[in-house]
Image (tube, rainbow, N blue to C red):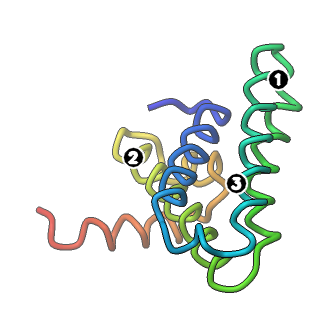
Amino acid sequence: ISKDADAISVAITIYALSKIVEKIKYKEKGEWPNFLKNSKIFLKKAIENLEKNNLELFRKNLMEIRNQVNRLSGEMKTFFEEVFRKAMLNKAKMMYEHGISPEETAKILGVSQWELMDYIGKTNAGKT
């Protein structure tokens, strides 16, 4: 488990996009083609900028993928936001389980310690 914010951002973005692409019902929505096209463009640019060692643009490109979600509307936007939030919390939980403090984990991922601990508590409910 890495504390590298860029590696974490890539993992969260790819995981969330994979979950989004699995949802067939959204592929029929009018906003889907633009979301998919733009996400591919920004992902390709992120790869190119990473290969050029331009980390600032790489980070901006990954952020633009997330910004695509903010441009959506209705149920689609709500679902996509939730996918990214759960991906982030799941990654935070894994980091915490590998010994990274809740404070550091929350700081790296931009979530509150309260939200992180609440998520961990809910996902570990019933486990001994």
The residue drawn where x is 42% and y is 69% is 119
Report the front residue among 61 and 72: 72
Q: Residues within 10 Å of mark 3 (few under 14, many from 20)?
A: some
> Which disc, if any, is residue 19?
none
Mark 2, secondary structure of its residue: helix
Image location of residue 32, percent across then percent down: 69, 65
Image location of residue 91, percent across then percent down: 47, 49
Judging by the rendered image, the residue that carries numbered circle 3 is: 36
Report the front residue among 120 and 45: 45
Dot 3 amino acid type: Leu
Judging by the rendered image, the residue that carries numbered circle 2 is: 94
Pick out the residue farthest to the bottom. Answer: 74
With respect to residue 121, does 21 lie above or below?
above
Report the front residue among 3 and 78: 78
Mark 3, secondary structure of its residue: helix
Tag 3 near tag 2, CB within 8 Å: no
Judging by the rendered image, the residue that carries numbered circle 1 is: 49
Dot 1 amino acid type: Asn
